């Protein structure tokens, strides 16, 4: 196993990635370096009520803490983001600090772009109903954002994150209508101490989501030697660590692994399946991924090479002992099982067998499939879902 440094910083696409235990204690000093004095924390109710997280965050911000907006939810609703914008206009923060899982980090980023864009939620909804919805296009300066992840979903090394403008019942297409703007965080702070405060149920689902970013990056049709290197190193760390959570050393390896698999990440087949489910059900994406990914990989390796030699390197598979494709599926399944996640779609409430054809069609239409190394038909995608049932 490779060594994990105690602390490091890395400049990535205009953002500073900060890793290390206790780094949250210096969050206020970091903001001072950027000339930022009034921080509004954006988080969910569970995290906002958790003193093991909010205590260090508050102490780290010190007198730069303006307030806490703790209304985010996994659904990432437009109403939530615009309530946050109202809060921004009342209190005038000069920085938003997203704390928690992917939904909180996404909402923090979208609050920044929506506040600068100036349109109301009613404006967005009217355009969505008319089919003329345009993404946020801010005229003025964006409020800076800092993100402090506490789960492994892998939504932190990102400038985007969509929010729902119309639910399926109000949408002209019967599918949710979402929008997304972009703002690069000033900093991304990874403190393993904070990850250890997250319940294992939340860590497990998020871990499978993040893990699959590395899996998909390896077989992507647009992969490069650079993405190969970071994905292999990240998968190696996650493969070793995820089955040993919440051991402190495993947490550290998993945090670094999740950073690496996000570097120039590619997503395609597995995430398209996840999106197909999200258009119909309120399900945690990592849980859907956990069920689908072994079957998706079996389907993929039956039809293309899928750059399987790189997977052998990441997972330590000896091709003289077992076929690589079979070994990859076994190792991914072992990670899923070690995390205690479901193995069958029928175990997921409220998934119904009769919905699988519609989910297959939604998966087929998902833009993520453009980066897959094959062109699946709707029937083939439905067969994968049937195998996962």
Image (spheres, rainbow, N blue to C red):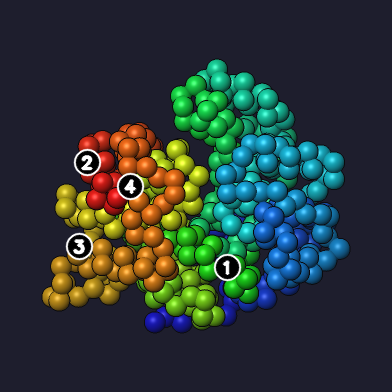
Front residue of this view, candidates 339 and 53 = 339
Front position among marks 1 and 2: 1
**Between discs 3 and 4, the one toward the N terminus:** 4
Quarter holding residue 376: top left
- Report the Cα–Cα distance between label 1 and label 2: 37 Å
Which element type, helix, strand or loop, lies under badge 1? loop
**Between discs 2 and 3, the one toward the N terminus:** 3
Quadrant into which the N terminus falls: bottom left
**Between discs 1 and 4, the one toward the N terminus:** 1
Within-10-Å neighbours for mark 1: few <14, some 14–19, many 20+: few
- Report the Cα–Cα distance between label 1 and label 4: 29 Å
* Residue 287 place in picture, x, y as percent: 43, 56
142 on left or right of 256:
right
Front position among marks 1 and 3: 1
Residue of label 1 = 199
38 on left or right of 367:
right
Badge 2 vs badge 3, beta-carbon distance below 8 Å: no
75 on left or right of 334:
right
**Between discs 2 and 4, the one toward the N terminus:** 4
Front residue of this view, candidates 386 and 293 = 386
* Residue 358 place in picture, x, y as percent: 34, 34
- Report the Cα–Cα distance between label 3 and label 4: 16 Å
Front position among marks 2 and 3: 2
Can residue 134 be seen?
Answer: yes
Badge 2 vs badge 4, beta-carbon distance below 8 Å: no
Within-10-Å neighbours for mark 2: few <14, some 14–19, many 20+: some
Residue of label 3 = 325
* Residue 196 place in picture, x, y as percent: 59, 73
């Amino acid at each position: 196993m490779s060594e994990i440094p105690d602390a490091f910083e890395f400049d990535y696409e205009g953002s500073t990635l900060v890793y290390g235990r206790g780094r949250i204690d210096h969050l206020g000093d970091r903001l001072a370096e950027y000339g930022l004095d009034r921080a509004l924390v954006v988080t969910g109710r569970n995290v906002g009520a958790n003193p093991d997280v909010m205590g260090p965050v508050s102490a780290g911000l010190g007198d730069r803490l303006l307030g806490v907006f703790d209304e985010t939810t996994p659904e990432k609703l437009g109403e939530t983001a615009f309530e946050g914008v109202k809060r921004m206009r009342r209190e005038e923060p000069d920085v938003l600090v997203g704390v928690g899982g992917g939904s909180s980090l996404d909402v923090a980023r979208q609050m920044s772009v929506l506040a600068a864009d100036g349109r109301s939620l009613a404006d967005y909804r009217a355009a969505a109903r008319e089919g003329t919805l345009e993404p946020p296009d801010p005229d003025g300066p964006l409020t800076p954002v800092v993100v402090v992840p506490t789960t492994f979903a892998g939504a932190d090394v990102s400038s985007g994150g969509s929010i729902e403008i119309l639910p399926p019942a109000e949408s002209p297409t019967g599918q949710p209508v979402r929008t997304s703007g972009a703002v690069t965080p000033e900093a991304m702070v990874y403190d393993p101490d904070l990850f250890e405060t997250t319940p294992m149920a939340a860590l497990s689902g998020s871990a499978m989501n993040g893990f699959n970013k590395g899996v998909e990056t390896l077989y992507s049709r647009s992969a490069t030697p650079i993405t190969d290197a970071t994905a292999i190193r990240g998968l190696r760390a996650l493969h070793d660590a995820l089955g040993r959570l919440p051991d402190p050393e495993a947490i550290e390896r998993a945090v670094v692994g999740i950073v690496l698999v996000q570097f120039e990440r590619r997503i395609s087949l597995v995430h398209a399946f996840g999106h197909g489910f999200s258009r119909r059900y309120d399900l945690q994406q990592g849980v859907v991924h956990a069920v689908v990914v072994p079957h998706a990989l079996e389907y993929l390796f039956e039809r293309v090479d899928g750059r399987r030699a790189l997977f052998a390197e990441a997972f330590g598979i000896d091709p003289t002992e077992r076929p690589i494709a079979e070994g990859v599926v076994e190792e991914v399944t072992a990670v899923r099982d070690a995390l205690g996640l479901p193995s069958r779609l029928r175990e997921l409430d409220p998934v119904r067998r009769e919905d699988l054809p519609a989910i297959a069609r939604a998966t087929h239409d998902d833009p993520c499939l453009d980066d897959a190394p094959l062109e699946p038909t709707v029937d083939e995608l439905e067969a994968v879902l049937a195998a996962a049932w």
